Amino acid sequence: MPVQGMERRVITSLTNDTVKYIEKLKKKASFRREEGCFVVEGIRMIREVPENRRILLFLTEDASRQHPELASWCERTELVSPQVLQKLSDTETPQGMLAVVSMSDRAPSAEPARDAEPTCTAEPARDAEPTRTAEPLYLVLDGLQDPGNVGTLIRTAEAVGATEVLMSRNTADPYSPKVVRSTMGTIFRVSVRITEDLPSAIEELKKKGVVIFGTHLSGTDFYEADLTGPAAFLIGNEGNGLSEAVAATADRLLKIPMEGKVESLNAAVSGSVVAYEAYRQRAHNRSS
């Protein structure tokens, strides 16, 4: 029995127009950008979604009974069969719920028509909460391909109070299901900006007084660098590191000292280490 306030009809067709629309959102980054929305799964992620970003919720009947509070989660809530949910899910063991959410803050809309495609917004996302650090701090991702690395760095950005995560278009899409899942909800609280021309975007930061630090094997020991001022850290592709064009924008190249025969660290680990050193230095300045 559906929870109160939810219609009794259950979507069972795998060719339902809304089902096909969500499947396309899940698979195609270009379509997500065009529509201005993306898909999230699971109770933890769904609870993280700000109210003004909620567009559509799919629930199985079992999930609706387990979480009756979700009946009023957004304006449009649909019951679907486990088979439909399984088809749309990006995980091996779906939790019985999936939502379409906006990339940006959105004004409440009229009740969507049944079976119509969800109404999304393609407006650029507004900046998230202001940085907690005394000076601007940016994480700049150059061609990272692993969704887990991108998601981890977005989480790190929130943890260190970063101003923004700036990324090249050829970096893994931050709104893909795997990246969204690995952000653990921080995708809704961190300012993320994708640019077609990363070197030019970096040059704009430099005009604002931001010092550009590139993580590079030929750099100097980053523990000796003063990271207390406005700073941006360039983090390169997992296999090839920074592209030549992006590395050329750096004011200074830094490397993480390592023992043994290790030549490099995972991109997310490297970015997190340097970001936390900046956080440590800034926290020390504030307390002294």
Image (cartoon, rainbow, N blue to C red):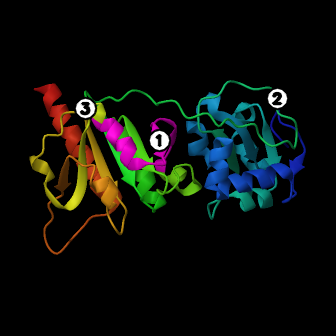
Instruction: Identify the residue position indicated by label 3 in the image.
Output: 209
Tag 2's secondary structure?
A: loop
Q: Is residue 35 above or below residue 111?
A: below
From the viewer's perspective, tell me whether residue 173 is left or right of residue 58: left
Answer few, some or many: residues within 10 Å of disc 3's Cα (few below 14, many 20 plus, some between 14 and 19): few
Q: Is residue 39 above or below residue 85?
A: above
For the N terminus, give its image quadrant.
Answer: top right
Q: Nearer the viewer, residue 286 or 239?
A: 239
Q: Nearer the viewer, residue 138 or 258?
A: 138
Residue 156 seen by the camera = no
Residue 16 x/y as whole percent: 86, 54
Spatial CA span between label 3 and label 1: 19 Å
For the C terminus, give its image quadrant.
Answer: top left
Report if residue 84 lies within the magenta region.
no
From the viewer's perspective, tell me whether residue 219 is left or right of residue 275: left
Answer few, some or many: residues within 10 Å of disc 1's Cα (few below 14, many 20 plus, some between 14 and 19): some
Name the residue located 58 percent from the left edge and 54 percent from the top edge.
Answer: 177
Report if residue 186 lies within the magenta region.
yes
The magenta-colored residue range is 183-206
In the rendered structure, find residue 246 and report the number of the disc placed on it: none
Answer few, some or many: residues within 10 Å of disc 2's Cα (few below 14, many 20 plus, some between 14 and 19): few
Spatial CA span between label 3 and label 2: 47 Å
Farthest-out residue, right? 9
Instruction: Identify the residue position indicated by label 1 in the image.
Output: 193
Res 221 quadrant in image: bottom left
Q: Nearer the viewer, residue 17 or 193?
A: 193
Name the amino acid type tagged 2.
Answer: Glu
In the rendered structure, find residue 111 and report the number of the disc placed on it: 2
